[in-house]
Amino acid sequence: MKNFIGAEKIIDKKREYIMPCLGHFYAKPPQFVRGDMQYLFDATGKKYLDCYAGVSVINCGHCNPYITSRMIEQIKMLQHVCNIYLTENFVNLAERLAAVAPGDLQKSFFCSTGTEANEGSLLLASIYTHSSEFIALQSGLHGRTKLTMSLTGIGMWRTDPNPVGGINFAPNPYCYRCPLGKNPATCDLACADKVETIIQTATSGRPAALIAEPIQGNAGIVVPPKGYFKRVKDILAKYGALLIVDEVQTGFARSGKMFAIENFDVTPDIMSVAKALGNGQPISAFIATKKIADTYTRPGASTLGGNPVSSTAGLAVLDYIAEHDLMGNARARGEQLMNGLRSLQAKFPIIGDVRGLGLMVGAEFVHADKSPAFRELDALLEELKNRGFIVGKNGVGRNVLAFQPPLVITDQDVDDVLNAIEIILEREHYE
Ligand SMILES: Cc1ncc(COP(=O)(O)O)c(C=O)c1O
């Protein structure tokens, strides 16, 4: 067996050689050395059930043998020439994406990260509309470049001291803590209507686009009410503005549909995808209708975008999702998980809210006064890890237990993690 340097040495080297902006989870983190579908193994050989999938990346499971073997075949044949030369995998993948993307989204541009895909979506919207004004949602997250970070509405991730202008933020559809102080039963989607007020009062009247995640991930798995995106899209259309949907975290069967925006019966004008498209291989894309895409005529190329290996991974992912009905499993296991968490919520008031779609599920931890119970959540996560369960955390208050597991998890896996949470909450007397 290979000798691993171990968690402590990794932390020492991080401190010495990695920029300090990069944190890590856990007071006592393991060193992960191996993955096998929904399971991870650390340097001591300990097994974990992965309920976070590298933040919504490993939808088809770690080191999925089918995807790995297709990639190995390609790695042995040809790894890279740059897409200024002709290879066939990226056009085949673009054709497949057009077939599964919502509505008439048809043409793709391939790049490598979610940030880059969003940056490209925004560029395309600017080219098409001749405007560089944008609207984003509070508590959304779109990336680390100048523009995508400026469009990110979470203080913690807005580390640029000089964000760009021309951006306005609309209230996010976060019904558990409505930013407008409304009651979801009677609000009549007031947060969606605010988009129109913003266009009329804070922009030139013709912004390029609104960018939004269909389910806000980093915000703490915030699921908008059913009619939200339809109302927003109608408002945008009135002003000639586009709807860009950031499916970086939500795409590829995660929500029980291929793309999460399909749960809202709305077709975006431009869509960014990344993460799960490569199942761990770096690949991303922005996809637009033919009419919009065809305005991007001046030169544009990405050295590694859609290279033969990452495009092969994308093709294998789409095959695997279809052949193993991962959308069906996301719906069934997601329902089981939500029901289990709701039962725990009835028993432990520290769970203030349970929400999600498919296998993108959050449980918000709160004190009696609804303030974020982030310390209690951290303690729970540490203990879950000790017991062999890797569960995520997000939310503006860092108080949302986040489940975004590989979509291959079984009902036994879901029962196991729910049981572990119950045992810990009972033992620690969480109130
Ligand atoms: C919704 C969303 N958009 C964009 C990004 C940025 O993606 P990347 O880290 O691949 O650049 C992330 C990253 O977590 C994300 O969650």
Image (cartoon, grey):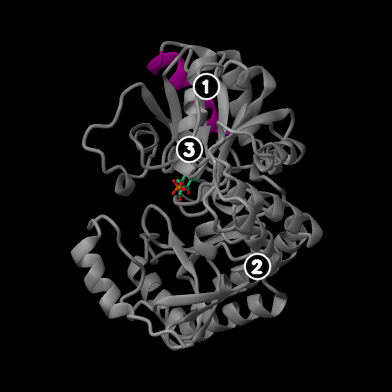
Residue 203 relative to residue 62: left or right:
left
Q: Please say whether residue 355 is one of the residues in the magenta stretch.
A: no
Q: Which is nearer the eye, 13 or 21?
A: 13
Q: Is mark 2 on a helix, strand or loop?
A: loop
Q: Position of residue 330 (x, y in %)?
A: 70, 61
Q: Name the residue under label 1.
A: 125
Magenta span: chief secondary structure: helix
Does residue 194 show up?
no
Q: What element carries label 3?
A: loop
Q: Please say whether residue 201 is one of the residues in the magenta stretch.
A: yes
Q: Where is residue 148 in the image (x, y as percent from the top left)?
A: 40, 35
Q: Is mark 1 on a helix, strand or loop?
A: helix
Q: What is the C-alpha distance between the residues marked 2 and 3?
A: 27 Å
Q: Which residue lies furthest to the left in this view?
A: 16
Q: Mark 3 points at which residue?
A: 303
Q: Indicate the amino acid at tag 2.
A: Asn
User: In the image, is the residue at mark 2 within 8 Å of ligand 1 by its beta carbon?
Assistant: no
User: In the image, is the residue at mark 1 within 8 Å of ligand 1 by its beta carbon?
Assistant: no
Q: Indicate the amino acid at tag 1.
A: Ala
Q: Nearer the viewer, mark 2 or mark 3?
A: 3
Magenta range is 189-203
Among the two numbered marks 1 and 3 on one chain, the one whose residue lies closer to the N terminus? 1
Residue 178 relative to residue 78: left or right:
left
Q: Name the residue under label 2.
A: 64
Q: Where is residue 379 in the image (x, y as percent from the top left)?
A: 37, 77
